[in-house]
Amino acid sequence: MSEVSTAARLRVTGRVWVFGDGLTTDDMYPPDAMKLDLPEAAKQVFYAVRPGWTEEVRPGDVVVAGRNFGLGSSRPVAALFNHLGVAALIAEEFNSLFFRNAVNAGLPAMTVPGATSRFTDGDIAALHLATGRWRNLTTDAGGTVPVLPDLVLQIIASGGVLPRLAEQGYLPAELADVLRSPAATAAGQGSGA
C-alpha cells in the first residue's frame, strides 16, 4: 500500500512559489541536466529563472505559474518536481503535453484563471481536484474551476499512469509503489533528448 492515500493525492495544501508566463521545459529541465542522474538534474529546475530555488523548495510546496506553462519538448519535468517534493501545480494555462506528463506522473495540476495575481510567494494554497475548488488560505480568495475528467482524476489519485495500470492488473500489482517513484516516472517518460 502506498504511503499517500488515494484521496489525499486529490487534495493538496502547501506553500506557494509564483512564476510568470511562458515558462518552458528548458527553464525547468535545462538541456545540460538531461545527462545527469535524477537527483542532480532536479537541482537544475528553474535555475535560469530563479537560481537557488531548489535549495528553498520543500516537500508539500505548490508551484503557481502563468500562461503557457510547460511549452517545449516532452521532458520528464514532472518527475523532477516529484523528486523535489512539489505537491501540485497551478497555472493560468498549461501546455497540453506538459499537463498530460504531469497527470501521467501523478502530479496534481489545476488550471486557475488569474492564478499569478491571486497568489504570491509564501501564501498557502489549498486545492481539491475532485471538486475543482481552490483557495488561497492566506488571503481567503478562492473559487471553483471545471473538474477534470474521472479518468484523469483516477490516474492522479493512483499516483500516475503506471501505478494505475498496476492497480488494474495490467502490470504486476506488487510494483505499484515502485512505479510511483520519481525515477520510474522519469524512465517512463524518457529523457526528452
Image (cartoon, rainbow, N blue to C red):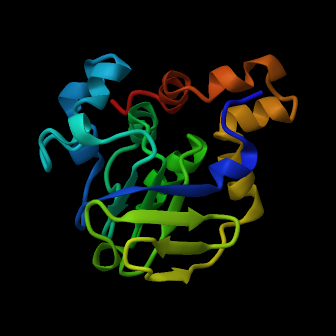
Horizontal and vertical percent position of residue 27 = 21, 46
> Can you say whether 62 is above or below 149 in the image?
above
Which residue is at the front of the view, 55 or 66? 55
Give me the residue at 62% from left, 57% from top: 11
The image shows residue 188 at horizontal and vertical percentages of: 55, 28
The vertical placement of 121 against 92, above or below, is above
Residue 12 left/right relative to 186 = right
Q: Quadrant of the N terminus?
A: top right
The answer to whether 152 appears left or right of 25 in the picture is right
* Residue 123, above or below 24: below
Look at the image and tell me whether residue 182 can be seen.
yes
Q: Residue at x 30, y 69 (%)?
A: 66
Left or right side of 11 for 111 = left
- Residue 71: quadrant of the picture: bottom left
Measuring from the top left, give residue 104's x and y in whole percent.
Answer: 59, 43
- Picture residue at 22% right of the left edge, 66% below the top: 20
Looking at the rendering, which quadrant does residue 148 occupy?
A: bottom right
Tally of numbered discs: 0
Residue 172 showing in the rendered view? no
Identify the residue at image location x=71%, y=30%. 2
Residue 116, placed above or below residue 125: below
